[in-house]
Each structure stands twice: as structure tokens, then as C-alpha cells.
Image: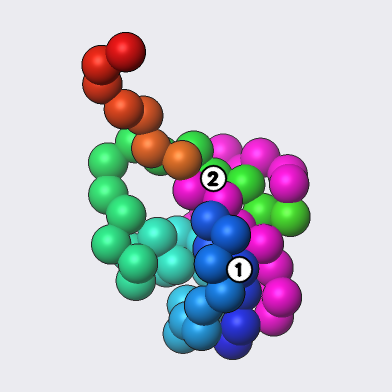
């Protein structure tokens, strides 16, 4: 399926948001949004992705 991940077009095999995070190598604490709507960690496993979805994944950074 074709999605946009952090602004970049991508073809992925994942069907859920949690599977996408695993497929793309995201680990640890991250914030996620699909089509500009926040998706909490507890709902990622049930959040079904659709062709054309826009997914944003943000990870905290140290420093400042």
C-alpha cells in the first residue's frame, strides 16, 4: 500500500499503525498521527491504515 510517512511517499506492507512502526524500525517512545489526527499508543494496534494515509511519527530528542 502507498502511504506518506513523515512527508515522504512510501510503499509498505503493514496494515496497522503498530505494524508500520515495526516495519520501519521505530522503537521506544514516539508520538503518532494519521491524517493529522493524534493516535495514542494504546490504539495503534487497532488502527487500520488505508492507501494514501499521511502518517507522522515524532520521537523525542535530547539536548536543546
Q: Is residue 29 magenta?
A: no
As helix, strand or loop, the secondary structure at mark 1 comes to strand
Q: Is residue 10 left or right of residue 48?
A: left
Q: Report the magenta residues as a range.
A: 36-57
* Residue found 69% across the figure and 80% down from its top: 51
Q: Can you say whether 30 is above or below 5 in the image?
A: above
Q: Please tell me whether mark 2 or mark 1 is closer to you in this view.
A: 1
x, y percentage for residue 23? 34, 71
Pick out the residue farthest to the front.
64
Q: Earlier in the sequence, mark 2 or mark 1?
A: 1
Q: Residues within 10 Å of mark 2 (few under 14, many from 20)?
A: many
As helix, strand or loop, the secondary structure at mark 2 comes to strand
| Quarter of the figure that contains the N terminus | bottom right
**Separation (CA) of disc 2 from disc 1:** 13 Å
What residue sits right under mark 2 in the picture?
32
Quadrant of residue 55 in the image?
Answer: bottom right
Q: Can you say whether 13 is above or below 27 in the image?
A: below
x, y percentage for residue 27? 27, 49
Any part of residue 46 in sight: no
Q: Is residue 23 left or right of residue 41?
A: left
What residue sits right under mark 1 in the picture?
4
Pick out the residue farthest to the top.
64
Amino acid at each position: 500500500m502507498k502511504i506518506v510517512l513523515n512527508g515522504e511517499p512510501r510503499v509498505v506492507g503493514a496494515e496497522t499503525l503498530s505494524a508500520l512502526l515495526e516495519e520501519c524500525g521505530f522503537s521506544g517512545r514516539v508520538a503518532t498521527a494519521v491524517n493529522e489526527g493524534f493516535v495514542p499508543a494504546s490504539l495503534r494496534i487497532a488502527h487500520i491504515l488505508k492507501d494514501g494515509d499521511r502518517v507522522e511519527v515524532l520521537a523525542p530528542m535530547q539536548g536543546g
